[in-house]
Image (spheres, rainbow, N blue to C red):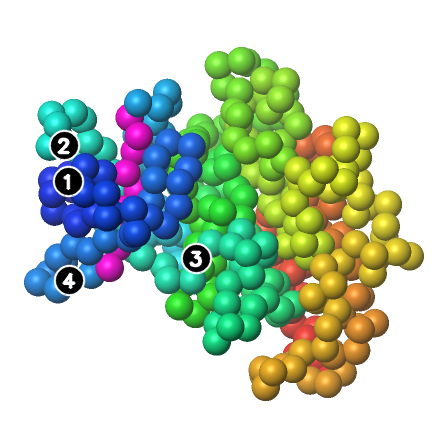
């Protein structure tokens, strides 16, 4: 069933864009087309904490992004997608247009923060362990698999990256930001070679499929490429835009050249430390470094298979998900 998205007044949500300067303390993040604030609104007589994405309508493409995200979110519902509560389309206090989307607030921030800013708890850095990263990877793959098989039309996200993956109380991953999303006619969802500048997608450098750079239309294979890069990034701790790669190298090639003999050199070193701190583990056997390297190598191979240069050589996201589930299951086998 499509999600109901009633238009509501901008004043119904606190921390709107024309609020006093103190609203900046509620700022969660800033994107290409606007900013996201932590706010409150009344739902069924209760005050609920929400995330409010306020569009900067002076930015070229912001209105199109708002329409694309609103349309995509109207008809999708999945545990690994960010839940939209309502949309706001109104006039602000200065008489200008005001557009915003109101989402369920997810308290654990985005994946980019966890990978690189190392959030703290009791003055100790919090680092995602191997099992947590693997579960997040499966959550994201599950969301993409749902979108790519959505009826009546598949949906291509077009901007998959760590900052668009939000984590809830239980560290379950939710894919968000559908501002570049595209609906595909089902009969065209598997086409790889139709090229037109009108359909070219910019997305985010480092995650954009190479075929988009020559004007190819959006396809599910573009999302698979982005997912592959994301997977490599999550388990190496290296951004695809890192200066260490230069013009002649990429994250994909960097990892591919290291496997299998030099895998330990490219794996995020935090993942090679023994599990401790009283965490529940899958057993002492899986705390051996060699075992962890073996599992991570299998994950990196999936990332390589997803991010191949040629779209037709990439594996389907559903196949990637099943392979990740098999790796996860091995952690609980003795």
**Pointer 4 local density, CA inside 10 Å: few below 14, some 14–19, many at least 20:** few
| Alpha carbon separation for disc pair 3 and 1 | 24 Å
Of the numbered discs 3 and 2, the one sitting upstream in the chain is 2
User: x%, y% of residue 59?
Assistant: 35, 24
Residue 47: which disc?
4
Name above or below for residue 169 compared with residue 318.
below
Of the numbered discs 4 and 3, the one sitting upstream in the chain is 4
Q: Which residue is mark 1?
A: 10
Circle 1/circle 2 CB separation < 8 Å: yes
Seen as rendered, the residue at the extreme front is 21
Q: Nearer the viewer, mark 2 or mark 4?
A: 2
Of the numbered discs 4 and 1, the one sitting upstream in the chain is 1
Q: Which residue is mark 3?
A: 109
Of the numbered discs 3 and 1, the one sitting upstream in the chain is 1
| Alpha carbon separation for disc pair 4 and 1 | 16 Å
Circle 4/circle 1 CB separation < 8 Å: no
SS class of the residue under badge 3?
A: loop
| Alpha carbon separation for disc pair 1 and 2 | 7 Å
Magenta-tinted stretch: 49-57
SS class of the residue under badge 2?
A: loop
Q: Which residue is mark 2?
A: 92
Q: What residue appears at the point 29 percent right and 46 percent down from the top-left corner?
A: 24
SS class of the residue under badge 1?
A: helix
User: x%, y% of residue 266?
Assistant: 79, 54
Quadrant of residue 265 within the rendered picture: bottom right
């Amino acid at each position: 069933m499509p999600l109901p998205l009633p238009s509501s007044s901008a004043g119904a949500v606190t921390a709107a864009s024309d609020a006093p300067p103190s609203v900046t303390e509620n700022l969660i993040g800033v994107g290409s087309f606007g900013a996201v604030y932590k706010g409150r609104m009344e739902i069924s007589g209760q005050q609920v904490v929400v995330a409010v994405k306020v569009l900067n309508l002076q930015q070229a493409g912001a209105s199109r992004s708002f329409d694309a995200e609103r349309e995509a979110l109207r008809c999708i519902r999945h545990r690994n997608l960010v839940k939209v509560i309502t949309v706001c389309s109104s006039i602000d206090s200065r008489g200008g247009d005001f557009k915003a989307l109101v989402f369920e607030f997810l308290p654990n921030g985005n994946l980019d923060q966890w990978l690189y800013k190392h959030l703290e708890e009791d003055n100790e850095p919090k680092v995602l362990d191997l099992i947590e990263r693997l579960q997040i990877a499966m959550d994201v793959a599950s969301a993409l698999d749902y979108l790519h098989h959505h009826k009546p039309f598949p949906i291509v996200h077009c901007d998959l990256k760590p900052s668009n993956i939000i984590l809830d109380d239980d560290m379950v991953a939710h894919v968000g930001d559908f501002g570049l999303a595209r609906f595909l006619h089902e009969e065209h969802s598997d086409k790889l070679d139709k090229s037109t500048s009108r359909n070219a997608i910019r997305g985010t450098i480092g995650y954009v499929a190479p075929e988009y750079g020559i004007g190819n239309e959006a396809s599910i294979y573009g999302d698979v490429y982005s997912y592959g890069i994301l997977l490599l990034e999550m388990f190496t701790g290296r951004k695809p835009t890192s200066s260490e790669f230069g013009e002649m190298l990429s994250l994909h090639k960097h990892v591919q050249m290291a496997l299998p003999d030099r895998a330990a050199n490219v794996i995020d070193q935090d993942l090679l430390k023994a599990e401790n701190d009283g965490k529940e583990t899958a057993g002492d056997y899986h705390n051996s470094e060699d075992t962890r390297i073996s599992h991570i190598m299998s994950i990196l191979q999936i990332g390589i298979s997803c991010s191949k240069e040629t779209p037709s050589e990439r594996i389907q996201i559903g196949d990637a998900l099943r392979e990740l589930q098999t790796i996860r299951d091995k952690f609980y086998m003795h």
